[in-house]
Amino acid sequence: KIQAMQRGKVARAQVDELMAQKAAAEAAARTTAAMFREAEEEAAEEKDEADADGAFAAAAELEDTLEKNAAALKIQAMQRGIATRAKVDALKAERAMAETSAAVASTEIEEATAAAAEFTGTEDENSAALKIQAMQRG
């Protein structure tokens, strides 16, 4: 039971860590989106100030980089999800194995108890046991 509690504690800590990583990835995505909007605004301002060809090229390059970053973040999040699901499946299998071995041990104990309860000795053994018990009581 203590081991199960510890495994649960560790699993919850891992889930908390993964959730923190997800929140960080989402924050990075929001930051990237904000940077993208700022870059678009700057590109629009540059377009007005500079010739059209130069500004469009810079905006396209920045957009391409931001799209790559967003795609990389999404792929990383998907990979973390796959890894976490694999860990959860392993923990479930481990728990099932522990429950199975606990059930087997319980059955063995019940069988041993039943066998011990069925023991009946001879009349001499019973009288000797009574004498020993009486001596112990005083």
Image (tube, helix red, strand yellow):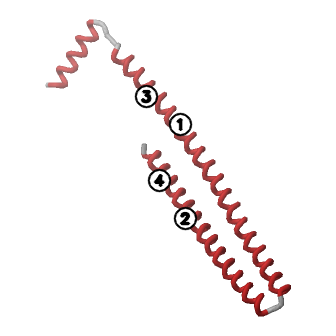
> Tag 2, which secondary structure?
helix
Which residue is at the far bottom? 49
Kind of residue at disc 4: Lys
Vertical placement of 53 versus 15: above or below?
Answer: below
**Could you tell me the amino acid type at mark 1?**
Ala
The circle drawn on residue 7 is none
Q: Amino acid at mark 3?
A: Ser
Disc on the earlier residue, 1 or 4: 4
Q: Is residue 118 above or below residue 51?
A: above
Percent x, y of residue 137: 16, 25
Answer yes or no: do the residues labelled 2 and 4 have beta carbons within 8 Å? Answer: no
For the point 35% across and 13% down, the residue is 118
Looking at the image, tell me whether mark 3 or mark 1 is earlier in sequence order: 1
Quadrant housing residue 114 = top left
Dot 2 or dot 4, earlier in sequence: 4
Task: Kindly report which numbered mark, 2 or 3, lies closer to the viewer in this rendering.
Answer: 2
- Residue beneath disc 1: 96
50 left or right of 30?
right
Picture coordinates of residue 76, whole percent (x, y)? 68, 61
Residue position marked by numbered label 3 in the rendering: 106
Tell me the residue that label 2 is attached to: 20
Q: In the displayed image of the protein, which residue is found farthest to the left?
A: 138
Q: Single out the mark in the foreground, 3 or 1.
A: 1
Contact check, label 4 and label 3, Cβ < 8 Å: no
Which comes before the other along the chain, label 2 or label 3? 2
Q: Vertical placement of 127 versus 47: above or below? A: above
Mark 4 — residue?
9
Residue 44 or 3: which is nearer the viewer?
44
Q: Secondary structure at mark 3?
A: helix
In the rendered structure, which amino acid carries the disc numbered 2?
Answer: Ala
Query: Which element is circle 4 on?
Result: helix
